[in-house]
Structures are given as structure tokens and as C-alpha cells.
Image (tube, rainbow, N blue to C red):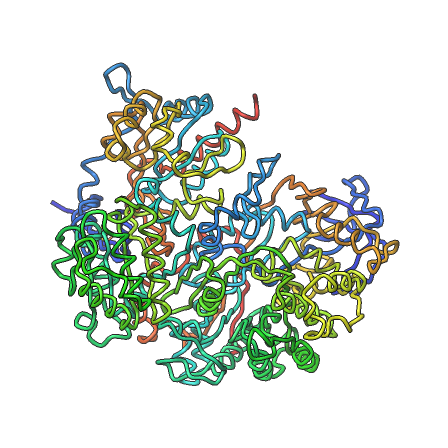
């Protein structure tokens, strides 16, 4: 039995309605408990901000395309090298660090849970191998269904039950967590070099539309009672005028789930563009946030862009090709048979570029205009908008109007006309930041009951203590202190163990992988469907028996049981 | 007499980068007695296995080999590697990623160099990819969609015998009604090959002419055939125009290239040109390009080294951080400079492929070879440690040439230890030694 007491913590725990009380946190065997014995080890938090461990609900850190980003970029590897220090392995990379690089840097920032945003089912083993080498965080993998042929057939048949059967089987087969749709239908069209321009355009060869894919998948997700909702990267990412597609998409789902959102829209910054060309692009963040403010069934994440070098990587193959024709930078593409696509290109976001500056402003507008912080998660779509190490600066921008105005005066001057950022004076509170970086994620992902995102009794003792005393700090003026505090915790605890202290990782605890195990009735057994099985015998290039991800890959897996109501 | 016969299915062939996973193996009395679905190369890998294995570890004493125990072999490896100033850990293409990962960590622990056989096959392809990227796809994408296939400097019928039947020309296709009839195969090579015999178009170019021909094709696709001379590296302009048209008319094209382009004059620049040719074609229709990776899990070594060290091969930890500079930190170069003072060779055969000076240096320094079978490298090494064979009596992860990770299957119990467990043991013992210094 191991016990630990954190004393004098300035606790914000939005899920429990604790709004900044000085209190003690007791930990036994990795979990939060009511009381510990008097003789246990004590950490004095000295009134510093103490939050549940950070959760990133949309990041790209492990798997085929992330690793290809590293593989093709020795220049990026050179840009962030650290030698071995104590328990820390050497690391390489700045925008796409090695797995240990990602893991240590997140840990320093107090993050204990990461959701990899895009795993192709067929390449799941790769993601799980890298999860095992990302030791400081518990991991979840959103699984790509945007071009899944078996799902398409169910959509074509308007058979929600069959769609649920395919999704349930696949998640269990590849040890995936939730459903990710990336440019639904568009990645399949890209198989022949095409893309789709609207959610009502037919997917070539398939007689279905993105709208139908999205709608059926949402219904199937709810039928399966998956912990997380459908996680959607809308069609038309990055295109001037794409806010119309986003608004239409926002109108698709009703409110179907009392515990969480029905639809999670990711990196909405990239989907809130007005104008018709790169020349007249402008922000439509107000229209997008108005829509979200009227739809409790929707949660978004920002996809904030920050200036500097980064790497874009997404399952959205056609989008990356468009980006390539703009930038003429090196371009990689990787279509995955019967399932999805992907692409990678490095970019440099410049404050001298009107387009980049407008993108920067839109992300901030969204976070400030969406009224309810539980509906807007703080992300950069790491590393697409910026590497995650920029999160503290984003927090600074959201908490301080002064800092924002200062930065706004440094970016391209068209930004003031084409966005509303300059006219927003909202400043977010520590509590709102806590919602947008952990509590909101725990709720949106449906992992509150797994002990994530709060300090209720029996919760996992994942804790971040930041060197800032909220009752003695005015973030509006002291934004630099706030940024510094979020860059490096005093202590990061995972499962009740101090894993990182003052920016140094000191030890690791075995991480978990959460995955969804749908227990389905016999009539939903896809392996009884000849059409489903034929995909493997005739069209996949691996046997069904070798497609299934073996237990060896989730040695510390936590199966989240779900199923349909009988 | 009574025989115990058994059939095991969905076995993964551990021979080449095609990583066929539909192999059926017949067992009689615990020995492999038959193999179905595999090509000749793969079938021999299975059928000849039992007769060729080394019984246990051996050590060179003077001009004799003496049997040693696994404990002695490990102790030798631990001592040699801990005391080395510039250890080289090379090979890795025939073992599973679980072992490769330990190799990368071991290199870091002892400040050594870790390099895979990539540096003597598709190293140049990776350099090109690092300059211009890689528009690729999985092999099933080609199988289901491609109507036009190019093999360039590659002869799959001999080197990857089932590539055509599983993934390209002879494979079932979702989007083609009569796939075999509708598909066109174009072969670029300096000589006639078994593959060029079945091609609908054979472009025979002069040795070293790849770069020129690719440049001419790029110009034609860009609408600048006026700058192309009548003959390019032995190929008539009219043929190049015809081929360029075929490529533009394709609905989905796939270009596969082999060591015939990576290892001839121009090296990585050839590949860069080929990639940019494919980039150009993507402005007209859909094309992808892929290297024909040779050894079963050579691509796995690139993947695992990348997520651990940041680089796909040739990683030098001498200064505590990962340093990558092919041409300097590649195995051949380190040996040619006679820098390495100890070597661990895992699941590969540099004795058969390295320049003579490199082999001579390997023979001079303590060299520990992990290989189930005697090989050309046996003659160079100090100690050879046989271990279970990936895909026969050991299982683990391997990455197909297109990046698809597959778990190989273990279907025999032989008692040989796995290379993963041996490497783990060596790593742990060296780590403990370091902690006590
Ligand atoms: S093509 Fe390669 S992987 Fe397939 S059976 Fe032959 S040797 Fe084995």
C-alpha cells in the first residue's frame, strides 16, 4: 500500500464544482481517497494551482503518418534533440518529436491522457506499438471510418444496425476507442484523385453522400453507446468559404445523448473560413460560434494555429495534395485500402501572411465566442496548427486581452478587418481553462467514469500542480507568469506517482490503453455476413485472421464495455 | 507407423517484403512437411529450415569452433559491447520490431551506432523521400484500383515472386471487371527480365540512364516534349511520349522501383526524380510510388528506429544524442574507416553483401552474430548465436513494404530462445553493469 498527501493545494475541479479552494488531496495506491494515515509522504503544494491531469482530446502523436512525418524530416529531428537525463531517454524532434519526446514534453506540461486523433484500422498495430513507447500518458485511439467500405454499404442500405455492427466489430478488432470521420467520403474519392465539394455530393462509385455517412454513423455510435461521440473532421478543410459546409454539418445531429455531446467537431478553426479565394478569405467564427451556442449537442476543439514551423498531417489526403500545390513543399501521401487516406506536408505559419494571421485569429475567436467552455476544447490539432508545446501561450492569449492586443498588433494588418478578434474583450478564467484542458475532455470523451478529469473518490490520481497561485495572480496583466506556469509543472503525478518534477521526468508508471469493446447480439455478428467476410478474402491485402490486433499489443488495455440495448 | 499431421493457416512468410500472410504449412511429427501458397523462395525458407539450423551458440577459438552455452554467449556479448569504444549494431531486417527496439535502445546505452540493411538497399530512397516526400499507398489500394503499373529497376518475378499475383497484375480488383485484361504493366530496365517478358510495354534504357529518362518523362507530362531529344539514354522519344500518355490516361497508376535504380549512378537523385515524376502525374490523375523493400522486416527497422531515435537508419549515439548522417554513420562507412571496435550483427548477412575491406575489418574485431543459420558472415564472426526464427518458432511484429504492420505467427516449439529475449537479457545486464560503475 502506498500513500501520499498533497497539502495546501489550490484546487480547481470543475466536474466536482470545486472552484479554487485550498484543500488537501489524499492518494492511496494510485487513486484518490478520502483520508490517508498521518505518517505518509507529503507534498506541500503551497497554494499553487492544482488540477486533474491534462487530457488532450485531439492530437497526433503515434502511428503511421506521425512516424512518416518524422521519417521524412531529419531537419525537424535535429531541431529538438535532448540527451539522456536520469530516467529520460534521449529525444529528437520539435514539431513531430519521437514518442519519448512527445511523452516527456506533455508530462512536463501536466498531461496524463492523450487521444491519438486518427488511427487507420489496418495500421492499428503500429499505433499500439508507439503507444507502448509513450510511457507517461494513458492512450486512446480514434479509429478512422471515413472511407470504410463495409460502413458505406450499411449507409447505402440505410441500415443503422449494420453500421453499428461494423463499427463495433472494428473497434474491438483493432483495439480502437472512438469513431473518427475525416473528410467523410472525400478520402475514398481521393482513391481516384478526386475530392468532394459539399456534404450532399455523391461519393464516386458509392451512391451515398457525406451527409448520409455522418448521420448514419452518429446514429450507429449512439446505438452502440460508445463512450465518445462521433469525432468529425468536416469536409472542405482549409478552403475559403468552407464555413457553409461546417454550418450544414452542425445542423445534422439532434441532441441524442444526455451525458455528453452527440457530435464532436475537431479543429474548427480550419473550417470557419469565409470569402471565396485566398485573396478575400475572412473569418466566419461568429456564425460558427452562434450555431454552436445554440446546440448543446455539439462540442468542438479549436485547432489553433500558432506562428512558426510545423508539420501538417491528416487522413485528409486530398486536402494535403491541395496544400502541396500551394506550397510546393515536400509532400507525402498514404492511402489505406478500403478504409481511409492520409497526407503530410511541412508548413511555416507566418505572421506576415494575411491568411496565416487570419487563421491564428479565428482559433482564438472561436474559443472566446463559444460561451460555454464545456463546448470548446483547447487544441492545436497537434502538430497541424502548432506543436502542443504552444498550449501555454494559447492559454495566455485567452486569459489576457492585453497580451492578445499586443500580439494582434504584430500580425498582418488585414486581420483586424477580416476577423472580430480585436473587438472581443472576454478573458477566460483559470476555471474555464481547466474545463478546456481536462474536465471538458473527460466529459466529451466519456471517460469520467474511468476516473479521468476529476478528484472524486476513487478517481485515478493524475494530478498537475502548476507554479502559479491563482489568488495572488492577475492573468490579465501577469500573462507571462501564467504562460511560464503552464509550460512546466512543479509536479505531475500519474496514478499517484510523481512522474515529473520541475520539468524533469523522474520515473514512469505503466500506461494504459482504453479501447471500446462492443458486446453485440448474434444478429449483429458481421462475421456471419458473407459480404463483410468477402472484403477480406477478395479485397483487403491481409487475411481477416491477421487483421485482428492481438492482445500482445494492449498488454495494459482497459476494455470499455458497451453494447446495444436488447 | 503413426504420424501426427497438422495444418496451420494464415502463416506469415518471413522471407521478403511482400510479407504474404496466407501461407498454409503442413506439419508431420512436428516438422514442416509441406507449404502451400508460398512462392519458391518462401517455401524453401520453411522447408529447408530444420536442416540448416545451428544447434547452439559457437565461439571461435584459434581456427576451431567450440560449442558454448547461451549464458556464455550472452556474457561474451555483454562484456564485449560494454567495453567497446565504438560498437556497431547492424542488420535487423530479418527480426521483429520488438527486437529492433531493444537494438535502438542498446545503441543509446552503449553510445554505439545502430544501422540496418537499409543502408545497402533503399537508403538512397529514404534520402530522396527526406527531400521531396513520398506519395504512396497500401498495396491493397493498388490491387483494387490500379489499371497501370510500372516496375522500374525491379524484377518482382525473381525477387518478390508473389507481388504480381497478390497486389498488382494478377490480383483481383474491386474496380476493374477483368483486372488481368484491363491492367497494363510497364517495365523500365537495362536488360530483359522475367518481368519485362510479361509487360505490355518494355522500356529498355542504357545503364545509368534512369535520371535522363525520368527527366524526359517529366518534361513530356508538363507539356514540354519539345525539349526532349530524339533518343534519351537509348530510348526513342516516341516511346517516351507513348508511355507518358499511358500514364496520364491511367485512372490509378502505381510505380514500384527496386535497387536497380537506387544503387546505380545518380542514386538518390534518381529516386527524387521518380517521386517528382509521380507528383507531376498527380496533377492529371492518381499515381503512387513505392520502393520494393527486400527483407521481410527491413521497413520495420526504419519505423521503429524512427519513433525511438528520430531517424530511419544510420543512427550514431556516440555523443549521447541521436546523430544521423548517411555516408558517415552508415555501417559500411564506419567499417571502411576501421572505426568500429566491436560489432553485433542481427539477422542479416553483411559477409555476403559488404565490400571486402568492411568484411576484413569485421573479421578483425569481436563480432557477435545472431543468426539461426550458418552464413557468409559466420566466417567473419567471433561468436554466433542461433535463435528462434521469426515466423516459425518466434512471433512478433513485421512491417510490410507498404508499412502495414503484421504479426508473424509462431507455429513450432523448438526450444530455441528468441532474439527478443536474448537482446533483452543483454540490454539488462549491460544496464546493470553501467549502474554499478
Ligand atoms: S513473395 Fe515473398 S513473402 Fe510472399 S511467399 Fe514469396 S518470399 Fe514469401
Q: Is residue B43 left or right of residue B403?
A: left
- Is residue A434 something that shows in the picture? no
Asked whether residue B53 is in view, the answer is: yes
Image quarter of residue A391: bottom right
- The spot of residue A139 in percent (x, y) is 56, 56
Where residue B363 sits, quadrant-wise, is top left
Q: Which quadrant of the figure contains the N terminus of chain B?
A: top left
Could you say where residue A125 lies in the image, as x and y percent from the top left? 43, 55
Judge left or right: residue B34 versus residue B371.
left
Q: Is residue B270 above or below residue A296?
A: above
Query: Residue A282: image x %, image y %?
Result: 63, 76
In the picture, residue B222 is in which quadrant? bottom left
x then y, percent, for residue A106: 63, 51
- Of A543 and A437, nearer the camera is A437
Q: Residue at x 19, y 59 (%)?
A: B187
Q: Is residue A562 left or right of residue A430?
A: left
**Can you say whether B298 is above or below B342 in the image?**
below
Q: Residue at x 71, y 50 (%)?
A: A487
**Where the C terminus of chain B falls, by quadrant?**
top right
Side of A477 where A546 appears, left or right:
left
Amino acid at each position: 500500500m502506498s500513500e501520499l498527501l498533497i497539502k495546501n493545494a489550490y484546487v480547481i475541479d470543475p466536474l466536482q464544482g470545486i472552484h479554487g479552494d485550498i484543500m488537501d488531496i489524499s492518494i492511496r495506491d494510485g487513486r484518490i481517497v478520502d483520508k490517508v494515515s498521518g505518517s505518509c509522504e507529503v507534498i506541500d503544494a503551497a497554494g499553487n494551482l492544482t488540477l486533474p491531469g491534462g487530457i488532450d482530446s485531439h492530437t497526433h502523436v503515434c502511428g503511421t503518418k506521425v512516424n512518416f512525418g518524422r521519417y521524412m524530416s531529419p531537419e525537424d529531428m535535429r531541431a529538438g534533440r535532448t540527451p539522456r537525463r536520469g530516467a529520460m531517454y534521449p529525444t529528437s524532434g520539435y514539431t513531430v518529436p519521437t514518442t519519448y519526446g512527445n511523452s516527456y514534453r506533455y508530462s512536463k506540461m501536466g498531461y496524463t491522457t492523450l487521444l491519438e486523433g486518427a488511427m487507420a484500422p489496418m495500421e492499428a498495430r503500429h499505433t499500439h506499438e508507439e503507444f507502448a513507447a509513450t510511457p507517461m500518458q494513458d492512450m486512446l485511439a480514434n479509429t478512422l471510418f471515413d472511407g470504410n467500405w463495409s460502413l458505406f454499404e450499411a449507409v447505402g442500405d440505410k441500415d443503422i444496425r449494420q453500421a453499428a455492427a461494423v463499427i463495433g466489430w472494428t473497434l474491438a478488432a483493432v483495439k480502437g476507442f472512438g469513431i473518427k470521420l475525416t473528410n467523410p467520403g472525400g478520402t475514398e474519392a481521393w482513391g481516384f484523385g478526386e475530392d468532394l465539394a459539399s456534404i450532399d455530393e455523391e461519393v464516386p462509385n458509392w451512391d451515398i453522400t457525406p451527409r448520409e455517412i455522418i448521420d448514419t454513423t452518429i446514429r450507429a455510435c449512439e446505438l452502440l453507446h460508445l463512450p465518445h461521440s462521433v469525432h468529425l473532421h468536416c469536409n472542405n478543410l482549409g478552403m475559403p468559404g468552407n464555413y457553409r459546409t461546417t454550418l450544414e454539418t452542425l445542423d445534422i445531429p439532434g441532441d441524442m445523448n444526455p451525458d455528453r455531446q452527440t457530435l464532436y467537431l475537431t479543429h474548427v478553426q480550419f473550417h470557419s473560413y469565409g470569402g471565396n479565394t485566398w485573396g478575400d478569405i475572412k473569418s466566419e467564427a461568429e456564425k460558427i460560434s452562434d450555431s454552436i451556442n445554440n446546440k448543446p449537442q455539439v462540442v468542438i476543439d479549436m485547432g489553433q494555429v500558432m506562428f512558426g514551423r510545423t508539420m501538417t498531417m491528416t487522413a485528409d489526403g486530398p486536402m494535403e495534395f491541395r496544400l502541396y500545390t500551394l506550397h510546393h513543399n515536400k509532400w507525402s501521401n498514404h492511402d489505406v485500402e478500403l478504409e481511409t487516406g492520409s497526407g503530410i506536408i511541412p508548413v511555416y505559419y507566418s505572421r506576415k501572411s494575411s491568411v496565416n494571421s487570419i487563421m491564428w485569429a479565428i482559433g482564438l475567436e472561436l474559443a472566446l465566442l463559444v460561451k460555454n467552455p464545456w463546448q470548446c476544447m483547447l487544441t492545436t490539432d497537434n502538430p497541424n496548427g502548432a506543436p502542443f508545446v504552444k498550449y501555454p501561450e494559447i492559454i495566455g492569449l485567452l486569459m489576457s486581452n492585453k497580451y492578445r492586443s499586443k500580439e494582434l498588433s504584430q500580425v498582418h494588418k488585414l486581420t483586424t478587418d477580416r476577423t472580430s478578434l480585436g473587438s472581443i474583450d472576454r478573458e477566460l478564467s483559470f476555471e474555464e481553462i481547466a474545463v478546456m484542458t481536462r474536465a471538458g475532455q473527460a466529459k466529451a470523451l466519456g471517460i469520467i467514469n474511468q476516473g479521468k478529469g476529476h478528484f472524486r473518490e476513487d478517481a485515478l490520481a493524475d494530478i498537475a500542480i502548476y507554479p502559479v497561485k491563482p489568488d495572488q495572480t492577475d492573468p490579465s496583466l501577469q500573462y507571462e507568469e501564467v504562460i511560464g506556469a503552464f509550460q512546466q509543472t512543479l509536479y505531475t503525478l500519474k496514478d499517484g506517482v510523481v512522474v515529473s518534477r520541475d520539468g524533469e521526468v523522474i520515473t514512469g508508471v505503466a500506461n494504459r490503453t482504453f479501447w471500446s469493446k462492443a458486446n453485440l447480439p448474434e444478429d449483429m455478428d458481421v462475421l456471419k455476413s458473407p459480404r463483410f467476410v468477402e472484403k477480406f478474402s477478395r479485397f483487403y491485402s491481409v487475411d481477416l485472421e491477421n487483421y485482428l490486433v492481438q492482445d500482445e499489443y494492449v498488454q495494459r488495455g482497459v476494455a470499455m464495455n458497451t453494447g446495444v440495448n436488447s | 507407423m503413426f504420424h501426427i499431421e497438422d495444418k496451420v493457416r494464415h502463416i506469415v512468410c518471413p522471407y521478403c517484403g511482400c510479407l504474404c500472410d496466407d501461407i498454409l504449412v503442413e506439419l508431420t511429427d512436428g516438422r514442416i512437411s509441406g507449404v502451400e501458397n508460398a512462392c519458391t523462395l518462401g517455401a524453401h525458407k520453411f522447408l529447408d529450415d530444420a536442416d540448416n539450423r545451428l544447434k547452439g551458440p559457437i565461439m571461435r577459438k584459434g581456427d576451431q569452433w567450440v560449442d558454448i552455452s547461451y549464458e556464455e554467449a550472452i556474457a561474451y556479448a555483454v562484456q564485449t559491447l560494454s567495453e567497446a569504444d565504438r560498437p556497431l549494431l547492424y542488420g535487423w531486417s530479418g527480426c521483429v520490431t520488438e527486437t529492433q527496439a531493444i537494438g535502438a535502445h542498446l545503441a543509446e546505452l552503449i553510445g554505439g551506432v545502430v544501422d540496418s540493411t537499409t543502408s545497402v538497399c533503399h537508403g538512397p530512397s529514404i534520402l530522396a523521400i527526406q527531400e521531396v516526400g513520398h506519395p504512396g499507398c497500401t498495396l491493397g489500394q493498388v490491387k483494387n484500383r490500379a489499371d497501370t503499373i510500372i516496375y522500374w529497376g525491379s524484377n518482382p518475378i525473381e525477387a518478390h515472386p508473389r507481388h504480381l499475383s497478390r497486389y498488382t497484375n494478377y490480383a483481383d480488383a474491386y474496380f476493374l471487371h477483368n483486372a488481368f485484361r484491363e491492367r497494363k504493366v510497364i517495365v523500365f530496365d537495362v536488360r530483359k527480365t522475367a518481368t519485362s517478358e510479361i509487360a505490355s510495354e518494355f522500356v529498355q534504357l542504357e545503364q545509368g540512364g534512369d535520371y535522363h529518362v525520368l527527366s524526359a518523362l517529366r518534361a513530356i507530362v508538363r507539356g514540354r516534349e519539345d525539349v526532349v531529344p530524339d533518343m534519351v539514354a537509348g530510348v526513342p522519344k516516341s516511346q517516351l511520349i507513348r508511355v507518358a500518355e499511358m500514364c496520364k490516361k491511367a485512372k490509378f497508376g502505381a510505380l514500384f522501383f527496386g535497387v536497380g535504380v537506387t544503387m546505380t549512378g545518380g542514386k538518390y537523385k534518381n529516386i527524387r526524380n521518380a517521386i517528382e515524376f509521380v507528383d507531376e502525374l498527380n496533377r492529371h490523375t492518381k499515381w503512387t510510388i513505392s520502393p520494393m523493400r527486400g527483407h521481410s522486416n527491413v521497413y520495420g527497422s526504419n519505423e521503429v528506429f524512427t519513433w525511438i531515435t528520430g531517424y530511419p537508419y544510420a543512427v550514431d549515439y556516440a555523443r549521447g544524442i541521436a546523430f544521423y548522417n548517411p555516408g558517415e554513420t552508415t555501417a559500411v562507412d564506419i567499417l571502411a574507416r576501421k572505426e568500429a571496435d566491436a560489432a553485433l550483427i542481427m539477422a542479416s548477412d553483411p559477409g555476403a553483401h559488404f565490400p571486402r575491406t568492411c568484411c576484413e575489418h569485421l573479421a578483425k574485431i569481436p563480432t557477435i552474430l545472431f543468426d539461426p543459420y550458418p552464413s557468409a558472415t559466420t566466417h567473419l564472426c567471433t561468436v554466433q548465436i542461433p535463435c528462434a526464427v521469426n515466423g516459425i518458432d518466434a512471433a512478433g511484429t513485421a512491417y510490410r513494404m507498404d508499412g502495414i504492420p503484421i504479426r508473424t505467427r509462431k507455429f513450432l516449439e523448438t526450444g530455441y530462445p528468441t532474439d527478443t529475449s536474448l537482446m533483452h537479457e543483454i540490454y539488462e545486464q549491460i544496464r546493470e553493469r553501467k549502474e554499478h560503475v
